[in-house]
Image (spheres, grey):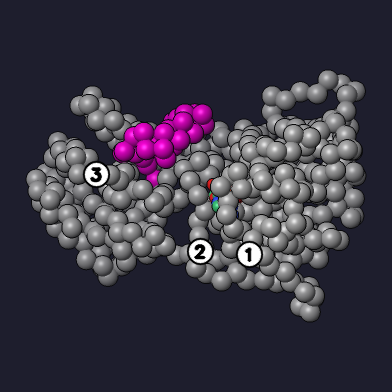
Amino acid sequence: VSNNDSEAQKAGGDASSEDGPDHFSPAEVSLLQKIIRKGLVESKCDIEIQRQDPNSPLYSVKTFEALHLKPNLLKGVYEMGFNAPSKIQETALPTLLADPPQNLIAQSQSGTGKTAAFVLAMLSRVDPTKHYPQVLCLSPTYELAIQTGEVAAHMAKFCPEIELKYAVRGEEMPRGTKITEHIIIGTPGKVLDWGIKFRTFDLSKITVFVLDEADVMIATQGHQDQCIRIHKCLDRKCQMMFFSATYDQDVIEFAEVIVSNPLIIRLKREEESLDNIQQYYVKCANKQEKYDAVTNIYGTVGVGQAIIFCHTRRAANWLAEKMTKDGHAVAVLTGDLTVEQRIAVLDRFRNGQEKVLITTNVLSRGIDVEQVTIVVNYDLPVDINGKPDCETYLHRIGRTGRFGKRGIAINLIDSSEAMLICQSIEKHFNRKIKYLNAEDSDEIE
Ligand code: ADP
């Protein structure tokens, strides 16, 4: 059995060259979204519910107290700063904690509270007096497993009796030893090794099985088969919890193999819109003028933060280097950073240590961060044929509007081709992109 945790990691790095469009794998994107987001993504959409028996009662809670958690667990939830369940948690939590246990499939975009929901369920299902693994959570990569484990450790702050073991690359079990921790969080390869090949724990004693980021799991070579092999060794009565940010046909088919008789809850992604965004374009004759426009904008960022999108890694790195040399504190995020470096960059940006983040398309989704007020298209988004990429434009600039806050988008136009692209984007969305004199950024409303 091979342990291909790092498969996804390599994919991003190798697939894109310095001068081409930058690319991250689904697992990498998912991790970055987790890191950059400070709190919940709220949604105005209604939750959709499907279940086998439409007459069976369906519970929903508005408070964490209503869940009758162990007091120390409730304390942990409040310690995390959670006041009330998120929209998805209102329905997911009563099902996850129900007696007798019920299977659940939940789909909602990243940031809506899925992880917190299943971590809470995992912790409350554990019997700490029994010293063997009872809960198993599969994540697509090393980093995503660690993220989940950190949420669990945080929430279990007042439950020191609950123990957690990571089944990820780098963790070793001496031959013949058994795992005594209550919860295992790991990647499919390592869990397969430990559970089936070396029998360091008994898969048939697992009472809660969580499959997280199912869509990312499918996108990672070999993971789906490994998950299914693990699943085959579980007890029929084991509670199944299946989570995904998307719910395409391949995810649905995967879910059907893993979860029988589930409650299915789905929360539609709220569409981004340009409604609250002031859009501008700035004419630049050459690279120097483009650079001057960026530094002018930098001077006006004020209390907010800005993200600057470049088409290639080379352009992003060049711009970052030049701005840094000129004494501006900027961060840069491209596909040539290691995972640790990316996490560090996004952590700093999220905490406001740098006001400007220069990046490529790798971050076009998931930048709906409250404090980002200005988005600059250093290069307009184009597809591989050089045609305007309106979808990416919307992802870069658009907001879901929940903050009611206004944003500013500035497009730098350095050629007649770029002007044409800008015009066709304007036409596509039927939203005015106004001319802005770069020397006079006071014009920004
Ligand atoms: P997902 O797994 O869907 O991506 P998470 O569970 O990671 O979502 O939650 C996204 C963010 O919202 C995290 O920072 C998490 O700490 C926070 N969060 C989750 N549930 C709540 C809640 N009920 N109240 C406030 N914040 C929450």
Indicate the position of residue 229 as horizontal and vertical percent values. Answer: 82, 45
Position above or below: 346 against 384? above
* Separation of marks 2 and 1 at Cα, in angstroms: 16 Å
Name the mark nearer the viewer: 2 or 1.
1
Three-letter code for the amino acid on which mark 1 is drawn: Lys
- Residue sitting at x 12%, y 50%: 442
SS category of the residue bearing label 2: loop
SS category of the residue bearing label 1: loop
- Nearest the camera: 367 or 355? 355
The quarter of the image holding the N terminus is top right
Sequence-first disc among 2 and 3: 2
> Which residue is labeled 1 in the image?
62
Indicate the position of residue 149 as horizontal and vertical percent values. Answer: 67, 37
Q: Which mark is residue 423?
A: none
Numbered marks: total: 3
How many C-alpha atoms fall within 10 Å of the one at disc 2: few (<14), some, or many (≥20)?
many
* Magenta-drawn stretch contains 340: yes
> Which residue is labeled 2 in the image?
43
Position above or below: 142 against 372? above
Three-letter code for the amino acid on which mark 2 is drawn: Ser
Three-letter code for the amino acid on which mark 3 is drawn: Val
The quarter of the image holding the C terminus is bottom left
Sequence-first disc among 1 and 3: 1
- Looking at the image, the residue that sits furthest to the top is 174
> Which residue is labeled 3 in the image?
301
Q: Is residue 3 left or right of residue 179?
A: left
Among the 4 quarters of the image, the one containing residue 249:
bottom right
Q: Is residue 149 left or right of residue 209?
A: left
Bounds of the magenta span? 334-361
